[in-house]
Amino acid sequence: MHLLLAQQGTISDSEEAIDLGQTPGDILFLSAADSELAAIATAHRDRGAGPSLRLASLMSLKHPMSVDTYVERTARHAKLIIVRALGGASYFHYALEALHAAAARAGALIAVLPGDARPDAGLVPFSNIGLDDLNALWAYLIEGGDANARAFLDYAGAMLSGAEKPAPAVPLMKAGIWWPGRGLIGVEEWRRVAAEVSSRVASALSAELEIPPSVLPDISPTRGEIGKSHGLPAQEPFEDAALSAEEMERDLSSLISPLVGEMSGRTEGGIPNSAADAGSQPIVAISFYRALVQSGETGPIEALIEALMTLGLRPLPVFAYSLKDPVSTGILESVFSALKPDVVINTTGFAVSAPGADRQPTVLEANEAIVLQAILSASSREAWLASSQGLSARDLGMNVALPEVDGRVLARAIAFKTAARYDALVETNIVASQADAGRVRYTAELAANWARLRKTSAGDRRIALVMANYPNRDGRLGNGVGLDTPEGTIEVLKAMRAAGYPVADIPADGDALIRHLMEGPTNSGSDGKIIRVTLSLNLYNRFLESLPAKIQDEVRARWGSPQDDPYFRERVFALPFARFGEVLVGIQPARGYNIDPKESYHSPDLVPPHGYLAFYAFLRHEFGAHAIIHMGKHGNLEWLPGKSLALSETCYPEAILGPLPHLYPFIVNDPGEGTQAKRRASAVIIDHLTPPLTRAESYGPLKDLEALVDEYYEASGGDPRRIRLLSRQILDLVTDIGLDRDAGIAKGESEGEALKKLDAYLCDLKEMQIRDGLHVFGVSPEGRLLTDLTVALARVPRGLGEGGDASLQRAIAADAGLGGGVGGIPPSVLPDISPT
């Protein structure tokens, strides 16, 4: 095993053993939060004199050898060790045990504090100081901010010197509106600031001028400290505290005007031409952790604010201690009730709902806004660029998988960790989160397009429905797993027409739709077909040249020039679209020509041809689609080359689809492949039912065999000669049709044992669930299909199989008083299921 020496000005995010190389100090402070380490380092630098301080990231001490080396070189010499263990003792158990043992041997003090505001009794045994001191230190870190950071260090110094300890922590707001350079502001002040800045942006754009830095005069690298006059009542760290309604009303009164009215119902889009028009522009809320404000690490949020304003949107930056904290959510509910955001960009991790449990609505979608998940990655930009995965396992869990439980739509990683500087006073790299301009711009454009969709009336929206074609032949047009995609598309068109969308000339049924599409170009070719929609070579070249050079080079290297594409003719691309009013229905192009479609469909490195790019270029730039709907599992867009998630501009799904709102009806029993579309194409997955299920039953020789077995058991009570005859007939028939192997009957096995195995096999076979047709999107099964499907879904236990999750058979058994009251299920559990 090699021990790597940590380098100044770099980030360590690997599992390798690291030697931090720190010299001893009087006080050690270890935390998993880079923003917290940065805040304490700044406070120490501002204090000047005092005990020597060493800071270290717990994430650098994941390897046992790293811990042992740090204890030997640094920790065993300390007089006071303070650890902020985010995730609890189990996550850092080896490090906590080693630090506690080192403190015990040296007679030093050690305080191990929870990484958040929730008490953690499992950490108490690792500390050797009094509960009052633990609470005091913890409170300073919970509240955060410059003053509390300085008081934290003063308190730690007083514990060593015996001097008078500073005043308790100053409580800060759990949540609120924050603006760069102004700190915490109220609703009315936000209205004034947003209108002023939006007006300046509009003036600059209308004059066709480049927006100067002065557009955002209030954005500065200063901390934007939260005003103390708005603080909530202090909360004892190791006690649960609930805020009364009166206290909530009192503390919000200075932030939210009681005279705030509803926003204007106007929905016109575009860039406002005046401050008055600016008030009608969409509001995009940005949700982020309070810790960023406390530490001053708000650079990525400021970059997102600027990008949104450049697009003519009104950003609403709101911070919260936690979306699970009732005080925080109460404040955000009041803010969102007054301002009603059209879109929300969330940067917090984890989830409000628990995986596998009933979903809990969050405050973020209170106004029925789409919630986009933007990621402040814990990895470096270099690691992201080099990774085919895109994000580390830590980011994937906290910032992708868990937020998906709350229904958030993954946007992009907009910032990455960078070692901004090496602080010699505390001998550690101060790590900051640095925004990536391209990823910020994409996320802002995605939010702008969702806001545009919401603000546009149904009659003015342009929607495209795209049907898959796999394998690429006409007999598989509109193929979707378990879905009658053509008929489902007809149902969608009818529903859109009823909702006021500009839909016309809907075909009579799914078959008529397919016949109409087959008259035009398909993946089988375009010769002799009716060409309804085209894209000129000039417009295509303009689109191609707007893509990253890497993509241009790869497409040309694999497929030649655009004129070589088989769907290019007479200076235009023939596209597989059909118009129904102002709605398009299209056939998704193949990923390539003259190749095995089955092998290429999921290929991780096959770049699409020019005709494929022309298809989406038309939707984005000629048709001007407000949203694209891919109908049914599954298309091939989400399988194009690029990162698995947190895509870059050179990833093909992003380059081709762009920041367009994307909806995707998908079969409910395949979340794995649906996740691919969610993470790589920012799709809103709309689950649909499986096809109706029914029992396989018996047929042919199997039905004859079942009748013989039934006759055998009926005769078993009184006719031995008939039993022997039937037994021989049954086993001979089983051997003739080769069923003995399937039933697990071995050669030489007794007749009685063979008949038992056969009976069990026939019962299982008859009870097997099979599909009975296809599901039609938007249409529930009826009659026998509904009964069979309901029985199929209810016949097996769900979850833990307790209470209402028990199986239908168990419920019937309980009703009949059989099985000792299995599950204790009352008859009323299944009141709507009947044999009629």
Image (tube, rainbow, N blue to C red):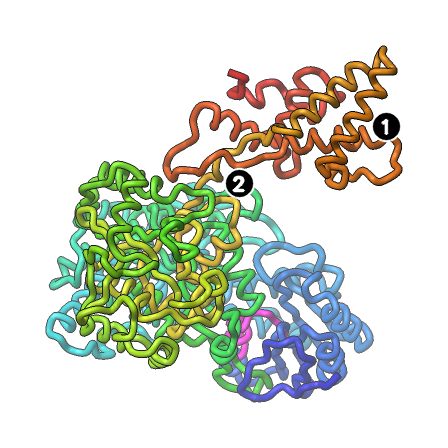
Q: Secondary structure at mark 2?
A: loop
Which residue type carries mark 2? Asp
Occupied quadrant, residue 798: top right
Q: Is residue 704 magenta?
A: no
**Residue at 24% across, 54% down:** 520
Could you classify mark 2 by the number of other residues whose Cα lies within 10 Å: few (under 14), some (14-19), or many (20 or more)?
A: few
Occupied quadrant, residue 533: bottom left
**Residue at 67% across, 75% down:** 61
**Residue at 67% across, 88% down:** 23
Q: Main secondary structure of the magenta part?
A: helix
The region drawn magenta spans 29-42
Decide if residue 105 is in sight here.
Answer: yes
x, y percentage for residue 289?
46, 62
Which residue type carries mark 1? Gly
**Residue at 69% across, 66% down:** 92
Residue named by callout 2: 358
Q: Is residue 719 left or right of residue 610?
A: right
x, y percentage for residue 507?
24, 40
Rendered-image quadrant of the N terminus: bottom right
